[in-house]
Amino acid sequence: MSDKLIDPADWPGGVLLNLGCGHHAPKTWINIDRSPMMVLRKAPRVRKALRKVGVLHDAHMIDWPENIIRRDLSKPLPLADGTADAVYSSHMLEHLFLEDARKFLAECARVLKPGGMMRLALPDAEQFARDLLEAGDDPEGKAGIQYGEMLRAHPESRPSGKRLVAFVGGSNWHRWQPTRGLVKSLMTEAGFGDLTEYSFREGKLPHLADVEQREDSWFVEGIKS
Ligand SMILES: C[S@@+](CC[C@H](N)C(=O)[O-])C[C@H]1O[C@@H](n2cnc3c(N)ncnc32)[C@H](O)[C@@H]1O
């Protein structure tokens, strides 16, 4: 993983950070993720072999674009203070331990210019809970199972053998649930103000349509004060 600082001179259109980008890497954004799948992007045969023995699934067979910086976002961001124009992060924050999510938001505030904007897209944990309650006594048990799946708090069966390798190597589990109140208090604590919720692809973030993919989310923007 590279420790080189991002140079704003290389980004005349603006330093726009897409953090925890997955394999969606628009050219207008600086895309960062640490998925182990990026290591295998030049090794399709190894991927195929790992799928054959059950360590990887079909979803892992996607070719990850080259324009993604591999970096662990629980560590400091590779930027000097006050050099970024905007930060976008979709369905990533809840994959960090809560204490690391706090540090991550503080890092986003550190690297943003005053007045810089941050937008988060997050799974709607409150809606999942409402769906569960609306299912009543859930006679077939479907709502209970679905609730567990939506929370992605843990696998449904004990990982063992090959699946244990994928489980330990992956970071696919949600480590906390991003309710609106909790996320907004974390953002405020990190130094963001003017917190505003928006709908899908609506808001003030620059080049939003390039980067926003997940309608199955709730969205909040804040300004670095
Ligand atoms: C659920 S995916 C979301 C991908 C994409 N942003 C989206 O909205 O579909 C979570 C992404 O966060 C990345 N991620 C999780 N923990 C991370 C970490 N500590 N550092 C960097 N990326 C991380 C994963 O590799 C994965 O690509």
Image: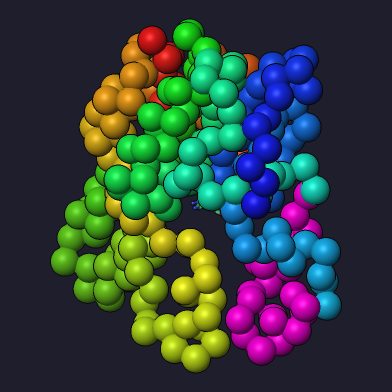
Is 164 placed above or below 151 here? below
Percent x, y for residue 36?
A: 62, 63
Is 3 placed above or below 39 here? above
Percent x, y for residue 13?
A: 75, 15
Q: Nearer the viewer, residue 117 or 199?
A: 117
The span shown in magenta is 46-65
Q: Quadrant of the C terminus?
A: top left
Judge from the rendering whether residue 46 lies leftward or rightward of residue 120; answer left or right: right
Q: Which residue is pictured at 59% across the width and 17% down the height?
A: 83
**Which residue appears farthest toward the left when viewing the image?**
137
* Residue 125 in view in this figure: no
Kindly indicate the quadrant of the structure image that contains residue 59: bottom right
Judge from the rendering whether residue 40 lies leftward or rightward of residue 108; answer left or right: right
Q: Which residue is pictured at 44% across the width and 89% down the height?
A: 160
Is 25 placed above or below 188 here? below
* Residue 192 in view in this figure: yes
Q: Is residue 107 magenta?
A: no
Q: Nearer the viewer, residue 140 or 63?
A: 63
Percent x, y for residue 192?
A: 36, 18
Q: Nearer the viewer, residue 151 or 193?
A: 193
Q: Which residue is pictured at 83% across the width and 64% down the height?
A: 42
Q: How is the image coloured?
A: rainbow
Q: Is residue 52 magenta?
A: yes
Judge from the rendering whether residue 118 lies leftward or rightward of residue 19; answer left or right: left
Q: Which residue is pictured at 77% across the width and 78% down the height?
A: 46
Percent x, y for residue 64?
A: 75, 55
Q: Nearer the viewer, residue 153 or 167?
A: 167
Q: Please state the total of marks drawn on the protein image.
A: 0
Is 15 placed above or below 3 here? above
